[in-house]
Image: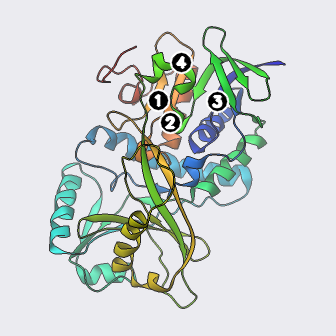
Amino acid sequence: MIKKVSTAIVGGGIIGMTIALELALRDIDSMIIDEPTSSKTTAAAAGMIAPISEAVFNEGTLIKPNLHAQQLWSVLADRLTELTGNESSLSNIPSLLIAKTKDDKAIIDNLVNYYEQCNLKIEKLSNLQCGDVLAGLTPNFNSGALLLSDYFVEPLKELHLIETAYRKLGGEITNSTATSLDINLSQITLSNNDIIEAKDIVLATGNSGAEILGQKYASKLQVIKVKGQIMTLKLNETAIKLERVLRGFVKGTPVYLVPRSGDELVVGATQEYTGFEIGNTVEGLFNLIEPAISLFPSLRDAEIKSIGHGFRPGTVDNIAYIGRIASTNIICAFGHYRHGVLQAPLTAEIVADEIQGESNQFVEIFSPNRADLTQSV
């Protein structure tokens, strides 16, 4: 069976689903090609909306779009509540950044100086002020800062809300995945042998990147799989609860703690350039647990609810591929690396603008045709 649709979106994670919702809000016909809520990348994400703490020295180009993405999350959260009748999990409580040792303070001082140079909203705190901001924090640390624009969400909850809103607006989601794509015919063959014919095809394919297009494109639009181990803990009834994101450095090791509902929290995440190496390791989990307890001692008696890992879809310059591949009907929306959840509504805006033929202030930054990619088609 051949089915025609204006826009086909390959991939039903938080990127693909947010694009689909934005298109539906603009009255653009679309279809998600994926098995519902099957995204392993979204499931492994901590959910930080963090334009400040994710601003690193060699990625200054991303600061302005990431701040815009954070603003778009507030709009998206309101829309989801309006469309579904359920509250978004978006929390606008600022994150706390902590340095454990003097050497860690040097790391954070460099970061804070960089944030200030970039006019990012931060507030340096004394040790006493840090304790007032977050109860249960270890008394033995060196310095801290409040990151005023760093928020968080629960990714799977948001994915479910976005899917619900999309369906309410008449959106369609297949129960099949894409097995092949014919660019010339604008056709996608599904795992159930159905064929989808679309005017525009959006690849929200995460770690799979441009593989479905073949080696010609996959060699240019490379995706580098960066492993991250992560764990979910549940605090006991008497423990002091975590109410905001806590990020820190302990003897040079970065760690973050992200609250979840039900007295749970996520501890993450390692950053391992090991290729597609599946599974958790003792060393990786130790590098999460030891610094996390050092910053937030209540974790000593916490229950381990789950351990897991995921693969961040990186690129050669750590900037996602978002936009149309020149002279094709293929629109890229993958390679978000650490910024997938944060950049979801931004990606949706850029893709929707492209489909409608409208300009977008960030299109050149993310273009899959940008000249500084290491290889060319």
Mark 4 residue crowding within 10 angstroms, few (<14) / some (14–19) / many (20+): few
Residue 188 location, quadrant: top right
Amino acid residing under circle 2: Thr
Between the residue at mark 4 and the residue at mark 1, the CA separation in whole angstroms equals 15 Å
**Separation of marks 1 and 2 at Cα, in angstroms:** 7 Å
Relative to 172, say whether 261 is above or below. Answer: below
x, y percent for residue 166 = 71, 41
Give the residue number, with chain letter if any, for mark 1: 322
Residue count near mark 1 (Cα–Cα under 10 Å), binned few <14, some 14–19, many ≥20: many
Q: Residue at x 46, y 29 (%)?
A: 322
Q: Which residue is mark 2?
A: 347
Could you say which quadrant of the image residue 155 lies in?
Answer: bottom right
Confirm or deny contact between disc 2 and disc 4 (CB under 8 A).
no
- Earlier-in-chain disc, 3 versus 2: 3
Q: Earlier in the sequence, mark 4 or mark 1?
A: 1
Earlier in the chain: of badge 1 and badge 2, it is 1
> In 3D space, how far apart are the residues under numbered discs 3 and 2 (Cα atoms)?
13 Å
Q: Secondary structure at mark 4?
A: loop
Mark 4 lies on residue:
357
At label 4, the amino acid type is: Gly
First along the sequence among labels 1 and 3: 3
Q: Is residue 133 above or below residue 45?
A: below
In 3D space, how far apart are the residues under numbered discs 2 and 4 (Cα atoms)?
A: 15 Å
Amino acid carrying mark 1 in the image: Ile
Q: Nearer the viewer, mark 4 or mark 1?
A: 1
Cα separation between marks 4 and 3: 18 Å
Question: Taking 45 as reference, is 8 above or below it?
Answer: above
Q: Which mark is residue 9?
A: 3
